[in-house]
Image (cartoon, rainbow, N blue to C red):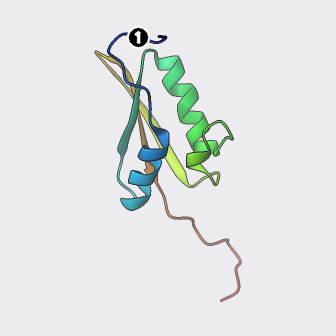
Amino acid sequence: MSGLKGRTRADHRHAAATARQLPGTWVLAATYGSSQSATSAAWHVRTGNARMPAYQPAGAFESRTELTQDGADLYVRYVAPQPAQGAAR
């Protein structure tokens, strides 16, 4: 068994689904053992990277991290897609 003892595996599909149901609300997606891991995951969320397909399309989610006693928390929120500028009215 790999990973830190007592730490649960991140369920990003569940976090993304919850955030889609609560647009604009920050949802705790995971707690990482290091701020570097959380920062990397936050980038994947924001860019809709293929490593985290639950957060696609790119730009559909925002992310932030917070340092805690347990590690680094990753929060995500769904932002409704904005209409393209110059779109026909």
Where's residue 12, x and y in %? 48, 40
Residue 33, placed above or below residue 12:
above
Q: Could you tell me if residue 54 is visible in this image?
A: yes
Circle 1: element type: loop
> What kind of residue is marked 1?
Leu
Residue beneath the point at 57% across and 67% down: 82
Q: Is residue 20 left or right of residue 88?
A: left
Of residues 15 and 75, the one nearer the viewer is: 15
User: Farthest left residue?
Assistant: 69
Q: Which residue is mark 1?
A: 4
Q: Position of residue 15 (x, y in %)?
A: 42, 44
Question: Residue at horizontal 71%, vertical 77%?
Answer: 86
Residue 88 in the image: above or below residue 76: below
Residue at the extreme bottom:
89
* 58 on left or right of 55: right
Q: Residue 75's spot in the image, x, y percent? A: 40, 38
Q: Nearer the viewer, residue 84 or 51?
A: 51
Instruction: Determine if residue 23 is in view.
Output: no
